[in-house]
Image: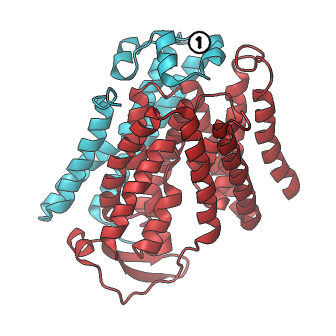
Chain colours: A cyan, B red
Amino acid sequence: MKINLEQERYARFLAAGANSGLVLLIIAFIAYVTGALEPHVPLDRLPELWGQSAAEFSGKVELPSGWGSFAYIHRGDVINVAGIGMLAMCSVPSLIAVIPVFASRGERIMPVVCTLQIGIIALAASGLLAGLH
Amino acid sequence: MKRRFFALIFAAVICSDAFAGVEGAGAGGMPWWAWPVALFVVCLLLGVVAVPAGVGGGVLFVPIVAGFFPFHLDFVRGAGLLVALAGALSAGPQLLKTGLANLRLALAPALIASTSSIGGAMLGMAMPVATVQVALGVAILAIVGIMVGVKPQEGYDASRRPDRLAGALRLYGVFHDRSTGRDIEWCARRTPLGLALFVLVGMLAGMFGLGAGWANLPTLNLVMGIPLKVSAGTSSFILTFVDSSAAWVYLNRGAILPMVAVPSVIGMMLGARLGARLLHVLPARDVRRLVLVLLLFAGGRMLTKGLGWWP
């Protein structure tokens, strides 16, 4: 079956992003649980904390949430969060890759839809909305 | 053999609840690693049954783990989104390459649903836990109703024309069905209504961390008139956008705990691969019934937990 160029390109970029993200996540998790990378929150302290809300948890462990935790990237638990962020971001390169394909055909709507989608993911990732309630 | 397998799944879920009730289970009664291991085992089993039952991992994960494990609902919803996202990311490339998912068809609904999923996630994080539990219980019971009552449309009327919006977005194409060897021309209809429904789909996905495959499929198939196989593939692919946006809200609020999320993702993905291999061995109808019973039980558990009847 013949697949459109944009669909084929999107699939290739998505596969590369998803596979590398998952592999990195598994490696980071192994480093975390084996203690190869020291965690910010000691593992044996987790059971007393994971029943509390995210806000209470962050307050008790004195770890800024979102991009603020980037300063602690050398910690086993924080690098796992970074790996998860990579997975949540891997649609963006795929979208960027297909915009020129749509545009080269003179299409106007699909490049705009792709750009808006990138903007929405970037807005969610930016943390700008985290302060809103 | 079948009965033993189904009994094992039920026992795993019930045992986790029994341990959750043990004095000190969350504080030091059990070693720290016992819960992640239990979570991995339960997710592995849920992954096995999710494939033959035709449901996504997220819709099973959130009510069962929130109902029977000691983790806060914030972390369970965050992990639920990641379970659904990881599954969709793994399947996405293959679905696109085989034409079972259609990129063009996915993009507009995905944009709408991912935007509203951000609103849903923010709303869900701001609501009191008991309110979310009650709403989640009601949503799960409604999903059971949809799974039982709404039958997907297998046939396809090729004489239809796309509506104006579908024409402008070029939401039409040809799907080659390998099982019949036929090419099926398809086009979207009732596109404005379909896109409007994706606002609701995204809200619910973000609010409860459920993924959204359970709602995407009927919207694409029954409302927009897309052939069932293209609807199923595209529905899964749309999750890569919806769950990414909502997951970032949870990440930025500190609601993703690697010790909950990563064993869940790995367990569910391994289970789904196992489930795909066992697809010809496991009786799909019995598995679907088991999943419905599990969802009924977990939905009821969430409802009673939220109402304070069964804390």
Q: Tag 1, which chain?
A: A
Q: Residue at x 57, y 52 (%)?
A: B139
Check the image and report above or below for B233 versus B65: below
Check the image and report above or below for A120 versus A78: below
- Image coordinates of residue A91 in percent, x first then y, are 34, 45
Residue type of the residue flagged with mark 1: Gly
- Image coordinates of residue A7 in percent, x first then y, are 32, 60
Q: Quadrant of the C terminus of chain A?
A: top left
Asked whether residue A17 appears in the rendered view, the answer is: no
Location of residue B157 by image quarter:
bottom left
Asked whether residue B254 appears in the rendered view, the answer is: yes
Circle 1: is it few (<14), some (14-19), or many (20+) Cα within 10 Å? some
Check the image and report above or below for A52 versus B61: above
Q: Is residue A44 left or right of residue A25?
A: right
Q: Is residue B90 left or right of residue B275?
A: left
Check the image and report above or below for A73 versus A11: above
- What is the secondary structure assignment of the residue under circle 1? loop
Q: Residue at x 51, y 75 (%)?
A: B178
Q: Residue furthest left?
A: A106
Q: Residue at x 44, y 33 (%)?
A: B126
Residue in front for this viewpoint, A50 or A14: A50
Q: Residue furthest bottom?
A: B159
Residue bearing the label numbered 1 = A35
Residue in front for this viewpoint, B180 or B37: B37
Q: Quadrant of the N terminus of chain A?
A: bottom left
Q: Total number of numbered labels?
A: 1
Location of residue A90 by image quarter:
top left
- Image coordinates of residue A88 in percent, x first then y, are 40, 38
Location of residue A68 by image quarter:
top left
Q: Residue at x 45, y 9 (%)?
A: A62
